[in-house]
Structures are given as C-alpha cells and as structure tokens.
Image (tube, coloured by chain):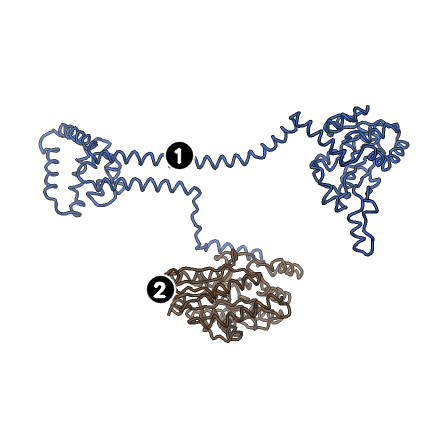
Chain colours: A brown, B blue
Amino acid sequence: MRILLTASQAPFLRGGAELHGENLCAALRRAGHEVERINLPFKFSPEADIERLMTFCEGFDLSAPNGQTVDRVISLQFPGYGLQHPAHVVWVLHQHRAVYELYDEASATPALRQLREAIHAFDGRVLPLAQRVFANSQRVAQRLQHFNGIAAQPLYHPPPMAELLRCSEEWGYVFFPSRLEALKRQDLLIEAARRLKCPVKILIGGTGGQYARYAHLIDRYRLHDRVRLVGAFSEAEKRVFYAHALGVVFVPRDEDLGYITLEAMYAAKPVITCTDSGGPLEFVRHGETGWVVEPNPEALAESIELLWANKARSRAMGEAGRARVQGLNLSWDRVVETLCT
Amino acid sequence: MDLNLLLTRLRKEAVAHGDPEMPQEVHAQPWAAVIAAHAQAGQTALLASAANAGGLGPYLVTDDENFVLLGYQRLLGRAPDPDGRAHMLERLRLRAPRTELLMEMALSAEARQLDPGRFLQRGLCRLLQLALHPPFLPTERLVRAVWRRLEKRLARRAHRTPFGLAWQLARAQDTSTQQLQAQLALLEQAQTEFRKQTADQLASQQLALAQEQATDPAQAAELANFFAAFEVAFRGPAHALRAQLEQDYLERLLAVRGAVGSAPCLDLGCGRGVWLGLLRDHGFIGQGVDLNSSAVAEAQAQGLDAKVQDVMEWLQMQPADSALAITAFHLMEHLPFSVRLALVAACARILKPGGLLILETPNPENIWVASHTFHHDPTHTQPLTPDSLEFLVNYHGLETVEVARLHPYPESARLPEVDAVTSRLNNMTCNGQDFVVIAQKPR
C-alpha cells in the first residue's frame, strides 16, 4: 500500500510526537508498505500562522498528487488531519492542547480566543470526514468526545524499546523521568519529599524549562540528601534507573498517554499517579499495580510511605503491573494492521 | 546508600550494559572515498571490456594484476581468492608464460565442474602440458624458453590489434583521470589550508596596515592637521576654552601652589597649549606633551614648552615626587584601558605629596553626550563613568578631592518643568556634559 504519513514538525524541537512518527513509519515499512512522510512546519505563535496552516491543509487535495496513486493518508496531529484524501485515517496523538484541555478563558488573549473558535470549528469539520478516527489513548478519545462530539477508538502502541526494560533488585529510590515542565508537576514530588519519614531517595530525570525552579525548591527545603535532579540520561541509564527503582512516580496534569506508566510496568515497578493525571489512569489500578492518589503533597507522601513500608507488596504490585501490560499485547504490527484495514 | 553513591552505581551499571545506538560513521574527507570508488569503477569497466573481447589477445595485453582477474573471471567465473591471486602473481614474477597458467586453470577441477564440455580445448591443453613436461626428457627449460619467446611475439602482435590499441588508450585515459582526481584532491586540500591561513593572516595584516598608516609621514601629517582642525571646531576657539579652564581650575591650582610650593605642572594631551598658556600667565612652570604634531607646533610657536611624544614614554622619564599638578583634559577617553591604568599609576608616582591629578572627560550620564556628542571624535575609545574613573585613581592610592559635573547645557535648553517626567528628562539631557575627577597624592 502507498501511504502518506503526515505530522507537524516544530523545527528543532524534538519530543515524543517526533519519535512516535518515526516508529510508526518504520513499522509501516517493515510491514511492506511504501511510506512517505509529510511534515508540516508548525509554529505555536503567532496564532495567525496556525490559522494559515489550517486553511492550507483543508484546501489541499492529496488524493492523486501528480497522478500518483496514494492508497491511504495517515495523520497523527493537528492540522495535518485536515488534508483531503478519501481514505484518510487519523490517529490523534493529541489535539492542539492550548485551545482544549489547557485553555483558560480567564487568561486567554483575544487572539487565542479567536484561534480557539477556529480550531474547534476546524476539528468539528474535518475529523468527521476521515475514514476512521483513532486516539492515542482513552484520555484523548474522551477529550474528542467531550469537546467535539467525535467518537474515536483508542489505539495503544508499545513504548520504544520496551522489550529491553528489566527489573532488578530495588535500591531504595523512586524514579520520576519526564521533561521538567510545570504540567509534569515534579514540584508535587519535591513538596511530598519534605513530609517523608522513611529514608527513600528520589531521582528526578530529565531536562526542561522548570529546572531552575525545581533546583531552587530542593535548595530551599534542604533536600539535597534526598532528592536529586539527574538531568539528561541515556537510554541505557534510563533502563537501569527503572530496573533498580523501588517504584515510579508519575504525577502529570492530564497527560495524553505517558510512556512512563507503560515503561514502569514493563520494568515491573509499581506506579504512583494522581486522580487527575489522565493517561496513566487507564493502566494503573489503585492497590493492585500502584497507587492513584489526590494531587496533593500529603497524599503523595503517604503513598510513598506505603511503598517503602511493605516492599514485598510493592514488588508484587510491580509484577502485577507487568502481567497487566503484557496482557494488553501492545504491538506495532497490530497498530499497522488496524490503521491499514 | 547516599545519593552520590547511588547515582555512581546506577551509571556504572548503565555503562556496563551499554547503549545499542551506534554512532553514524562520519567521513572527514568524503572526496577521498569518491576517488577510490572512481578508480575502482574505472578498473572494473576496463576489465569488463577486456572480458567481452574474445580470443587470447586480452590475456596478453593486460598487466599482471588484470591478467589474474581476467583469467579467474573468464575461466572460473569468479573473482580470485587472495591465496590464488598471490600464487599466480608469484608465478608471473618467475616468468611463467601466461598461456601456461591459463592452461592450468582450464584443466583445474573447478573449471571442469563449471563447464564440463570443451573436450577439444582441454585435450590440446593436456598435450601442450605433456610437451612442456615430457615424462623422460630433461627438456623443460628449453621448451619453456621457446614457448616464452613465442608468447612474446604473440603479445606484440596482440598489442597492434584494434583491441590492443583500444586497451592501451583506455589505460592511459584511466591513469590520467586518476592522476587528475588526485591533483584535484590535493588542490582542494591546499585551498582549504590557504583559506585558513588567509583568515589567520587577516588580523596581523590589519595590524600591519594600521602601523603603516601611523608610520607613513605624509599620512601622519594629514591626520595631525585634521585633528588639529577638529579640536578647534569641537572644543571651540582658544579664548573661550581658556576662559572656561580658568573658571574651572585656576583657583584650585593657585591654592595647591600655596600649600605645596612651586613645581612643574604637566599637561597630558596639551593640544595647541591653551592650558599651558594660562599656566604661564599665572607664573606656573608648565610642560605639555601631545601626539598631534601640528597642534604642538602651534603651542611651540607661542613659546610654550610642548613636545610631540607618546604620553607614557614621556611620563616614564619624569622623576618621582616632582610635579605640582598633572592635568589631562579630554585625553583618557582616547586611550585603551591598559594605558589608562598605567597612566594613572605613573601620575601617582610623579606627583609631589599634596599634588593634584585632574582628569576631565565627557560625562555619559548626560544621554545626549553618551548617545551622540561622544561619538563625534573617531578616536574616542569608550565613555568613562565618574564612578569608574574615581575608582581608578583611588586604586592607585590617590585621594578624591572632588568629582564634579561640568558644563551643563544652557538654561534655555531645558524644558519647562511641569512634572516629574520633564524634571527627569531635564536631568538626563541638560546636566553636565563633562565631568572631572580631582585627586590628591596623600602627604
């Protein structure tokens, strides 16, 4: 099958979405499909540029470019899913979050308000034209239903190199790998660390805009002996950090999916997450494979105490998590099959 | 376990497990690989043309290496293995006839397996081999010598056939192409090096140019004339400047002479000698130095003690504790910082205890000065601030007597002050255009 795979590309900003696109492309090619990628240059501002890109996509017909047959267009992101093709399959990683779940009417500029209306209308117009609409997670599907009244089926995929994750003897720390951004709420864990009685250590992995603020918090609370910002880590380091963790803490606000949950489960580690964390809630079962707690430092600290107090049970929870994630049978082959039939 | 130990152990294990990601190969000199590939392709094409030509000719006209390649390709249908190739080349070196080697190959088990027919050819080969090694006669050397001569004659003839000529031509072309490519690579390399050298030399050339300009007498004279005229235009006529200097500093000089006693007053950057003239008229011993020869000539014409010399050289010649006052009006902003530093140090040495150092310079607190008038003079380096200049003199052990803002814009230039904004604007634009740091050597 000849497939065009579209995605948005914010130049020189690499994140999960770029990796996801590459992995899907590789999986499609491995299955014998002929794939070409179309990356649309994306800028988060000014709003007018986003509108221009929407208008372009909606008006651009990809059904037979230059007389070439295109059997299918697969789109992962806004606004590429607006491109015209009779067999357009959309697998929504996430919508334009700034005008959906992250939108705040009180602080919105007039331009953002206008953009919000335009994007809601755009999504409402173009997504029903797609042959099928999938969502990267249950959470993303819920949002599509909630905001746009569009039914989307969740389609899960395995995190990259999940097969290399392993579980080893725990070395008495919890691990929180994520970009250091306000939405990921590493500060919740730092605040919780002040309230901890047990001698558990905390490793926070990743880089990002909040590094200075988090470092300052650790300084102010004198938590140097307990909490460490590990900074950037290699894939090999990541696997080792998972392998020896007592548990994994992942407490973002309204995450779309979050590889971290799945990676922790493949490494047989219990996961502590929050009731408003979005994606992780689809996998973590409170009391079975981890803890789902209120998003406040007290509740988080309490769950970490429990994690430490009964390590045998924590280990059993990790095992249960691994059994659960393996039971999901996540595979790229299944993803390719679903997207291409 | 403490956090550092924990991280060390984790990272150590990560290193032990390694990363599966492989770094991509980077070619430092991509064209080197290209040339090698070209050479390879050339050879192959040449050989293919030889292989396509039939008969014995190709075997006889090629060089040894290609003969081996060709033989293997045509008789065994493959490229030579390293051992086989080495063996054949060694036999050729020992002057074995090529046809003999070809016969051996044709009779080999591998060739037979590949092409079971050709009984006639193989029979002939076998016969010839028997002729070379007759079972009972010691004639091998003789037969081989005859054979070799025969082959030589055949080879000469083959070279004259159309194929032989084409082959030689192609060889020559191939060789020259390779040579050209090698030359091109060398040239590219040379060019890269040249670019680097050029960049390296640029700075020193610029420096040399600047020095040349300074040492070229005609140009130096022209520059001196320009800046003498420039001084007149921008500092104002001599009588106005003299009145200003008198108002600003004369009283202070008279007072210090009363306190310290008579001694020479040095003026750094004396220009046309306005200050020196004022000093003389009030009974001071004035000595000046300036780099501008035409301004100094003007001063000398008035009978003043001024000379053309580098200010630092001049200061180094002055004895310690010898000067009543050292003045530098609008000089410091022309000097690089290292010279300013050394200059104040020298002044601190030369001044008599109780003697005065007076440094006047444009005041960048006034934004018209900082943003505009300071830049009239192309030889200004950097505006100095009152605080930093005061620090500099204090650093060398001189005590501040006064830091004063001088020469405000006339009242008429000020906006009518109706509110805080106009008041602040007036302060920023109309206050002192110059400032002076007056410092004293401790007694």
Chain ID for label 2?
A
**Residue B129 percent coordinates (x, y):** 12, 36
Name the residue carrying label 1: B183
Q: Position of residue A96 (x, y in %)?
A: 53, 66
Query: Looking at the rendered structure, which numbered label has been put on residue A18?
Result: none
Q: Amino acid at mark 2?
A: Met
Q: Is residue A119 left or right of residue B54?
A: right
Q: Residue at x 41, y 43 (%)?
A: B30
Is B261 left, or right, of B196 in this rendering?
A: right
Instruction: Name the foreground residue: B125 vs B281.
Output: B281
Q: Assign a secondary structure to mark 1.
A: helix
Residue B89 seen in this snapshot: no
Residue furthest right as drawn: B258
Please identify the quadrant where the C terminus of chain B is shown: top right
Chain letter of the residue carrying label 1: B
Q: Position of residue B340 (x, y in %)?
A: 73, 36
